[in-house]
Image: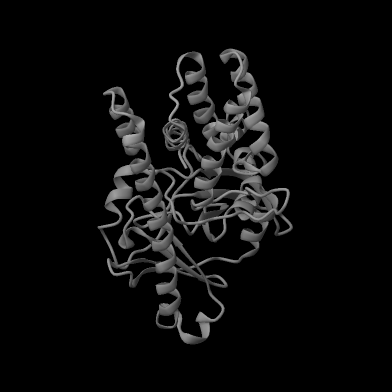
Amino acid sequence: MDNLTHACLGLGVYGTYVAATGHPIGGAVGWAACAAAVIGAEAPDVDIVARIFGDPVTYLYQHRQVSHSVPFWFAYSLIIGGALSFWAGGHALLLVTLAFLGVLTHIGSDMLTTYGTKALWPLTGRRFRGDSLFVGEPIFIVLALIGIVLYRQGVPLQSFVFALDAIALVYTCWRVLLHQFLLRRLRLALPSLVGTATAETCRIRVTPMLLPIPQAHKYVIVNDQRYWFGSFTAGGRPVPEAEVISDATPAVFFALQNSRVGRAMAWFTPMLVAKQEQEGQLTIVRLADAGVRYFDTLLFSAAIDLATTHDGSYALVHEGLRAQSMHIRRSFSDGWQRLGRRMRLTIASPKGYRSGR
């Protein structure tokens, strides 16, 4: 989830607390309480330091892992609440509690996204992926802005905060239920999409886009090295759009095992597509996450350049990684255009990759 949405969820925690208790908080304590909830809602993304002081691969290994785990839920809350209590002149328990609630909104919303998070580490190393919420959800930002405007106009918090909370909750439930509905429709349609025998051994995935409607969702079906891609109609019927055979060549295996980018993609990406190309003396291995698609392009991708050695093996020449990016305009239009039309999928080149070419 993007950081602006996280901040708005934290602001909602503060507003809900004040409305529920019926005791407006004023002065430094009020500002500290609001800050505790908002900073708590942002705190788990402290792993951004791996991006600032490291590189995209280091960040990929760190993102939504230990920084989102159970021990840090409490560590963030104690640090934030304790630090703000010095500024506010006390009220440590209140500030720690609000910070903790803010942290929980961050963890919960990230767990419902495409990449999820290892929220319950060290209890389990499983990455929880809800595939229900998009990486950015404007509705939460809009609800926060409505709340701010009403509060600034002097409207009592109790008269609108719970209504805004209800809208946010209903929207989230709708996203989750819609995802489950589409998964069920896809399972039922598997025999007709891939064949009865193949359907028994397939893995499936339904991923959301920006619009909370069936036709703005994508599906991927995987059987060994074969991938089927498609979307849904307004009624939830799966519609095939593309088919890809992922390469399983020695060059691909070498890239996955011997390059930092390849190892990171294999570890982080739940459904990995690999394609091998030849460009002069170089063998290019392109990798992509099958679940991140705009129109006919797989955006979360990597490229590894390999040279053939004298003994017939490979040597790493260059590698590049393209982090997931969000395109608001594409996200809106992708739910309406090209639905069900056959297309040839391409893997996006990493930004700056071999820029001198």
**Which quadrant of the figure has residue 95?**
top right
Q: Residue at x 33, y 62 (%)?
A: 214
Residue 25 seen in the current view = yes
Residue at the outermost front position:
22
Specify the quadrant of the image occupied by residue 257: bottom right
95 displayed left or right of 328: right
Q: Nearer the viewer, residue 288 or 310?
A: 288
Compared with 27, 151 (above or below) is below
Question: Can you say whether 259 is above or below 46 in the image?
Answer: below
x%, y% of residue 159? 31, 36
Counting the numbered discs, the total is 0
Determine whether 314 is above or below 89 in the image.
Answer: below
Residue 138 visible, this orientation: no
Q: Residue at x 44, y 66 (%)?
A: 180
Residue 298, position in %: x, y?
44, 54
Coordinates of residue 23 in the picture (x, y in percent): 45, 26
**What's the coloring here?**
one colour
Residue 202 in the image, given as x and y percentages of width and height: 53, 75
Q: Which residue occupies the foreground of this view, 227 or 64?
A: 64
